[in-house]
Image (tube, rainbow, N blue to C red):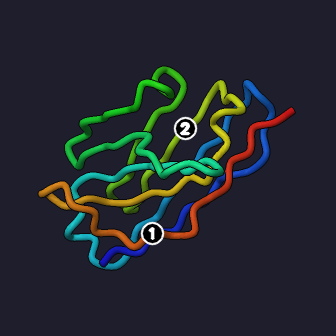
């Protein structure tokens, strides 16, 4: 399996920015796509953005135009740049990785907390 460590969360005011990072280790040969998820209090975990090894990106409508995903294949790291943050973006953010069949192959990490509040 692939181990994942997220970082970069914190407390930010509405309209602010944060950049999250997620480093993958272990069976990295199995990685095709890398993805960010989030889980708000009392809600189910939801997919936020994905990026394939070829650079194809998908971002959910709720963050489109504000969040961007990128990856550094040499470092096995995926990033989530979050701009114009809103209180509803408050959540624990997780990353995971998918193989060529679209199956999750990462062990869920502890995530990184993002709180958007004035």
Q: Position of residue 10 (x, y in %)?
A: 74, 50
Kind of element beneath mark 2 = strand
- Using the image, determine if residue 41 lies above or below residue 49: below
Reading the image, the residue beneath label 2 is 81
Q: Is residue 26 left or right of residue 44?
A: left
Within 10 Å of disc 1 (Cα), the crowding (few <14, some 14-19, many 20+) is some
Point 28% across, 71% down: residue: 28
Q: How many marks?
A: 2
Q: Is residue 103 left or right of residue 44?
A: left
Within 10 Å of disc 2 (Cα), the crowding (few <14, some 14-19, many 20+) is some
Point 28% across, 68% down: residue: 105
Q: Position of residue 87 (x, y in %)?
A: 72, 32
Q: Position of residue 54 (x, y in %)?
A: 20, 43
Q: Position of residue 26 (x, y in %)?
A: 34, 79
Front of the two marks 2 and 1? 1
Point 20% across, 68% down: residue: 30
Q: Is residue 16 left or right of residue 37?
A: right
Reading the image, the residue beneath label 1 is 108
């Amino acid at each position: 399996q692939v181990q994942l460590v997220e970082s970069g969360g914190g407390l930010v005011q509405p309209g602010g920015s944060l950049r999250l990072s997620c480093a993958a280790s272990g069976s990295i040969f199995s990685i095709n796509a890398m993805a960010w998820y989030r889980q708000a209090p009392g809600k189910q975990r939801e997919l936020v953005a994905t990026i394939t090894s070829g650079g194809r990106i998908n971002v959910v409508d709720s963050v489109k135009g504000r969040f961007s995903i990128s990856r550094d294949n040499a470092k096995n790291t995926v990033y989530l740049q979050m701009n114009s943050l809103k209180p509803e973006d408050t959540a624990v953010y997780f990353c995971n990785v998918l193989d060529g069949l679209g199956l999750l192959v990462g062990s869920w990490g502890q995530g990184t907390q993002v709180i958007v509040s004035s």
